Image: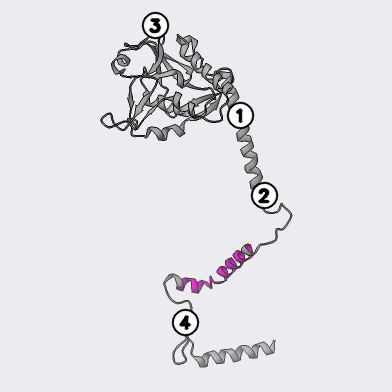
Amino acid sequence: MPIYEEKVISPFAIHFIQEHIKTHFQDGRVVEDTVPEIQLNPSDGKDFDLILKAPFPNIEILRWEPPHCRDREAKNWYTLDNRRLYCLQRMAAEHWPKRVGAVVDILYADTGRVRKKYDSTTEGRSVTISPSVKVPALRRWDWRVQIAQSRLVGQDEAAKAMDAVNRDCAKPTVHDLCDVPGPAFETMLKDQTADFVSSLAALLSTTRDQRQPAGEGTAASPTESTAASEASEASAESRQGTPREAALTKVNMPSKLIWKPKSANAEGFRPSQIRRSICQRAQVSKRR
C-alpha cells in the first residue's frame, strides 16, 4: 500500500488541524499574496467545474477523528498544511458557486503529528489569522461565512455546489474520492493550448506582414525619415575626405592647413611657384 496517492477534493471539505495560522509561510512569503498566484484549470464538469493549480506542493490530508469530537462516530478530512488550505479555500470562495476542486495527497495513517498539533476549538471549521500567536488575531476565516456574503448567486446553483461539498465530506475512504483527471483531460488541455498557440502565431504573422515594405519588384517610395537617413549617410561618406586627411585625423592633426603668404604652404611651394605652375598648365591646355 502506498504512503499516499493523489486525489481531487473540494477545499471546503477539508478541516484545519490548528486554531491559528500565521500571515507568512516559513520561507517568508506572504500568505495573502499567494492566493492570486493560484491558477484555475477547467474540468470535465462531471464532479467539478474548476481544478485549482497552486504554486506550492499538494497539501496532505487524512481521514481522522479528533480526540475530543462531540460525535465519536464522525470522521472528517483534516490537514496539517493549514496555511495552504486557507489559500485554496480563499480561491474557491472567490468562484462560488462553481464546484472547485484541488489535487491533494492522501495519507493513510497518522504518525502522531496530527494528534500532537491538533488544537482547534471549532473542529477545524475555521481558523484565526495573525502574525504571531502572542498578538491578537487579525480576523477569523470561515468559508461558510464568506460564501454567505456572496451576491447574485442563485439558490439552485448554491444548493448544487453545497451538495458537492457535502458529498466530499461524507466520503469515508480514499477510493471514494475523485481521481486526478487522466489522459483524456490532459489531451483536452493540450488541444486547447495548441489552439491558443496557433491563434497567437497567426496574429503575430499578420502583424509582421503589415509592418513589412512593399513586395518584391515594387520600389517602395521613401518616406521623409528614410530620405533623411540616406542623405545623412551620403553626407557622412562625403566627409570621409582623402586618405591624407584620414591619416592626419588619426594623428590628431587638423585636416586643413591654413596657407600663409610668407611661409611655405602645405605642399612646400611658395606663392610664386604656384602661379607659375598655373600659367604653364593653361598654356598646355590651349595647345591641346
**Which image quadrant is residue 155 in?**
top right
Q: Identify the residue at image location x=38%, y=32%.
A: 31
Q: How crowded is mark 1: few (under 14 residues within 10 Å), some or many (20 or more)?
A: few
Disc 2 to disc 4, how far (Cα)?
A: 53 Å
Residue at the image point whose x is 66% and y is 62% from the top: 223
Q: State the CA–CA distance, disc 1 to disc 4.
A: 75 Å
Most foreground residue, 217 or 169: 169
Instruction: Give whichever of 252, 130 is nearer the camera.
Output: 130
Report the residue that reaches farthest toward the right. 217
283 left or right of 39 in image: right
What residue sits 53% from the left and 16% below the top? 163
Give the foreground label among 1 and 2.
Answer: 1
Residue 46 relative to residue 32: left or right:
right
User: Which mark is in front, 1 or 3?
Assistant: 3
- For this orientation, the residue located farthest to the top is 73
Mark 1 and 2 residues: CB-CB less than 8 Å, in contact?
A: no
Q: Which of marks 1 and 3 is nearer the N terminus?
A: 3
Q: Position of residue 46 (x, y in %)?
A: 58, 17
* Residue wearing tag 4: 257
Residue pointed to by mark 1: 192
Q: Tag 2: Cα neighbours inside 10 Å, few (<14), some, or many (≥20)?
A: few
* SS of the residue under disc 1: helix
Highlighted magenta segment, given as a residue range: 226-248
In the displayed structure, 216 sits above or below 128; it is below
Marks 3/2: CA–CA distance: 71 Å
N-term mark: 1 or 2: 1
| Residues at marks 1 and 2, CA–CA distance in whole angstroms | 28 Å
Q: Which of 3 and 29 is in front in this view?
A: 29
Residue at the disc numbered 3: 73
Callout 4, which amino acid? Leu
- Numbered disc 3: secondary structure: loop
